[in-house]
Amino acid sequence: MRPFLFTIGDIRVPSFFFMVMIGALAATFFSSWWAKREGSDQVALLDMGIIAIIASVIGARVFHIVVESPMYYLEKPIRVFYFWQGGYVSIGAYMFTIAAWLVYFWKRNLSTWRYMDLAAMGVPIIIFFVRVGCVCVGCCYGKPTDFFFHLTFNNPASVPAAFGYAGVHLHASQIYFMINAIVMWGVFFFLYHRRKFYGEIISAFFIYYGISRFIIEFTRGDADRGMWFDGAVSTGQIAMLISFIGGVILWKILSKRQNLRIRG
């Protein structure tokens, strides 16, 4: 695969970072278009997109540093600022983005759950592009497999090669995530105009993504992402359990609030 798209002087532009930016822009413009279509504040969605780009990069970076490679950065703290060298974790991006959005809603006095639903419509798009980036770099790679559908990384600069998996048939975990993102968008599209309350789509995201990613994580082979209970579950799976439970609770709470009911 291709970990770096091109080089400018001593700076190499990572494919993953590039794909994240493309995905963020695509998701922002789609959600903004969807907001205009629904008669909502289009500018608010553009603002949310900009906030998401900044918060997701910071959050993904922080989560990678704290959870996956703390000693590497403690040895040479300046590495924290080497954004172009890669080192991002998607869960951190989601957490920081949602927190930043909540602050934005509060500052602008916007309907939190109405705009969360609008933003959620674009989330599968950025997830798809993030996983395209994963394929390019080889991160989030799968376990060795004999399954007919697999990925093989021969580039010595790819992540699997660094861990001794160059040329090995691996589960196409990144492709599974991409397919999952497409299905997720279809589910959201189906649900959107059948909603009974504002906040239903974002609740569905936490539930659907919690279940689907928890399952796909079993095919992953990158143990450096953090494993618990003698390797039984990963950090991501624990986060997905929290996502699923939180989504169910959120669904139950919001569905009972009369001021969030969608009439007609």
Image (spheres, grey):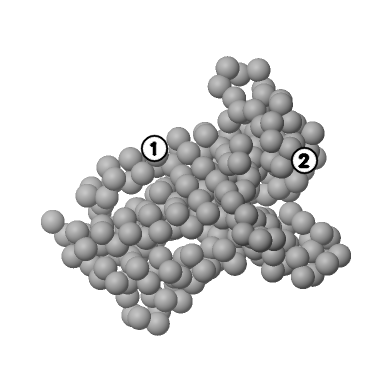
CA gap, disc 2 and disc 1: 32 Å
Residue 261 rendering spot, x and y as whole percentages: 24, 61
Give me the residue at 57% from left, 39% from top: 135
Give me the residue at 83% from left, 67% from top: 76
Give me the residue at 66% from left, 32% from top: 153
- Tag on residue 154? none
Label 1 Cα crowd, 10 Å radius (few <14 / some 14-19 / many 20+): few
In the picture, the quarter occupied by the N terminus is: top right
From the viewer's perspective, is 191 left or right of 138?
left
What residue would you read off at disc 2? 162
At mark 1, the secondary structure is: helix
218 in relation to 89, above or below? above
Residue 240 rendering spot, x and y as whole percentages: 57, 48
- Tag on residue 183? 1
Question: How many tags in the picture?
Answer: 2
**Outermost front residue:** 9
Q: Nearer the viewer, residue 133 or 156?
A: 156
Which of the two discs, 2 and 1, sits closer to the camera? 2
Residue 112 rendering spot, x and y as whole percentages: 36, 69
In the picture, the quarter occupied by the C terminus is: bottom left
